[in-house]
Image (cartoon, grey):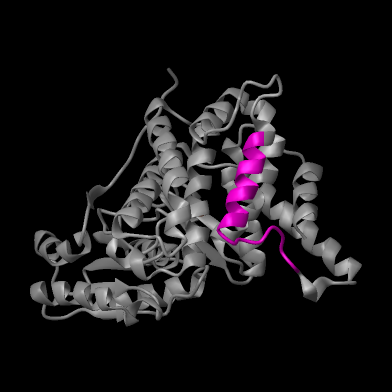
């Protein structure tokens, strides 16, 4: 009966939900929204249809596409400058985690001033930003429903987490249509990210009965649909189920927080500019190996949903690890990271490993991991993947 809170935005799910954006611009009385997206997204037909919906409601909008993978602090700072100088009054984020996280950061700075990195940590933001509508185009990051915004400190090359109710969007329009054009590898990485969200939220020290329901639902849906989603067998129904999985996982982790997989992935992805989902995929089984005894019953419940035998006296640890490895192999995500630039350079490798461990140990996601990990344990995981 420990105190827990649960925060979520208004959510609309379903076929062509994204095309309701125009109607909501009217609800928010927006005159000049800013659309935050990336250069890749704007080429698709569904993107044009979303713009058509925007055009039906407003005479003018500002398009901001200067967002890259693992969005950088200076991209958010420039976005905030554009938002203010153009007199925008609302933000629409269209894309995967990068545009949505960048949009959240633009919202913070445009209202509170200062530098985006001033807001790192939990509940540091004073004022809520302008209305924020998120249209996710990948099924994994769940930035569209979460209290998290992740931004890269370009000087330190570290991902910084901003965690606050004030970065929860006002509206999430969750539409499976954009997922049909997503390539298989991105589908695989984002799907594994969602699975990691659900597992880490379920074993988190901050879980609650409400987050548990969403976490287990997400695991079930990903188990049933990820293989088809990453193949020619995909249908709009499959992608809808993946979107629902991502949504459930997002509601779970936004409120229960995450764990060591994300702490290590943030450090790794920030330092080496690697895709977030790929980092999680490679780390997930290695962290379960370490964590298992600290949350045995919870991992066994997850294993049962995945159809793994839990009757052995040792529980489900081996089965669970094998399942993750099998899934990663089936959806063509590599097992290790090849750092050719560090080959034969022992000193550089040592320095990198040390920096990665320090980054992970200081990440706020580490706080809710079910087991307190030592420097050597974290270092050992990184050594396994290089
Ligand atoms: Fe994630």
Residue 318, percent from left and from top: 69, 35
Residue 101 figure quarter: bottom left
Query: Which residues are drawn in magenta?
Result: 319-338
Residue 62 higher or lower than 213, as above or below: below
Q: Is residue 320 magenta?
A: yes
Give the side of residue 233 with respect to residue 318, left or right: left
Give the side of residue 69 with respect to residue 250, left or right: right
The answer to whether residue 126 shows anywhere in this view is no
Q: Which residue: 50% across, 31% down?
A: 206
Residue 9, percent from left and from top: 27, 47
Residue 226, percent from left and from top: 46, 52
Residue 299, percent from left and from top: 58, 30
Q: Which residue: 57% across, 44% down?
A: 365
Camera-side residue of 71 and 292: 292
Dominant secondary structure of the residues highlighted in magenta in the image:
helix
Q: Which residue: 9% across, 75% down?
A: 56
Q: Is residue 136 magenta?
A: no
Position of the C terminus by quadrant: bottom right
The answer to whether residue 316 shows anywhere in this view is yes
């Amino acid at each position: 009966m420990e105190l827990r809170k649960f925060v979520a935005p208004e959510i609309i799910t379903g076929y062509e939900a994204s095309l309701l954006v125009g109607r909501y611009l009217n609800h928010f009385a927006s005159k000049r929204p800013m659309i935050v997206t990336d250069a890749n997204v704007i080429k698709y037909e569904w993107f044009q249809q979303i713009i058509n919906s925007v055009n039906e409601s407003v005479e003018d909008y500002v398009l901001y596409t200067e967002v890259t993978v693992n969005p950088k602090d200076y991209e958010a700072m420039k976005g905030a400058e554009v938002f203010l100088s153009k007199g925008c009054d609302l933000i629409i984020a269209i894309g995967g985690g990068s545009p949505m996280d960048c949009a959240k950061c633009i919202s913070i700075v445009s209202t509170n001033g200062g530098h985006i990195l001033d807001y790192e940590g939990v509940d540091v933001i004073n004022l809520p930003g302008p209305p924020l509508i998120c249209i996710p185009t990948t099924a994994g990051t769940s930035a569209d429903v979460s209290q998290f915004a992740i931004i890269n400190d370009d000087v330190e090359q570290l991902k910084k987490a901003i965690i606050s109710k004030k970065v929860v969007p006002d509206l999430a329009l969750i539409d499976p249509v954009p997922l049909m054009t997503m390539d298989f590898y991105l589908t695989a990485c984002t799907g594994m990210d969602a699975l990691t969200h659900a597992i880490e939220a379920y074993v988190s020290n901050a879980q609650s009965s409400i987050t548990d329901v969403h976490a287990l639902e997400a695991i079930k849906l990903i188990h049933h649909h990820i293989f088809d989603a990453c193949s020619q067998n995909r249908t709009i129904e499959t992608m809808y189920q993946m979107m629902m999985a991502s949504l459930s996982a997002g509601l779970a982790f936004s409120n229960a927080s995450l764990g060591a997989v994300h702490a290590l992935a943030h450090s790794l992805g920030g330092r080496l500019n690697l895709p977030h989902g790929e980092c999680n995929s490679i780390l997930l089984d290695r962290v379960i190996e370490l964590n298992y005894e600290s949350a045995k019953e919870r991992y066994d419940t997850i294993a049962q949903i995945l159809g793994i035998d839990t009757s052995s006296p040792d529980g489900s640890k081996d089965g669970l690890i094998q399942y993750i490895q099998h899934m990663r192999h089936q959806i063509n995500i590599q097992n290790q990271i090849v750092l050719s630039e560090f080959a034969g350079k022992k000193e550089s490798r040592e320095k990198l490993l040390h920096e990665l461990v320090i980054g992970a140990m200081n990440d706020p996601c580490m706080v809710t991991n079910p087991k307190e990990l030592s420097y050597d344990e974290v270092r050992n995981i990184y050594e396994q993947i290089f």
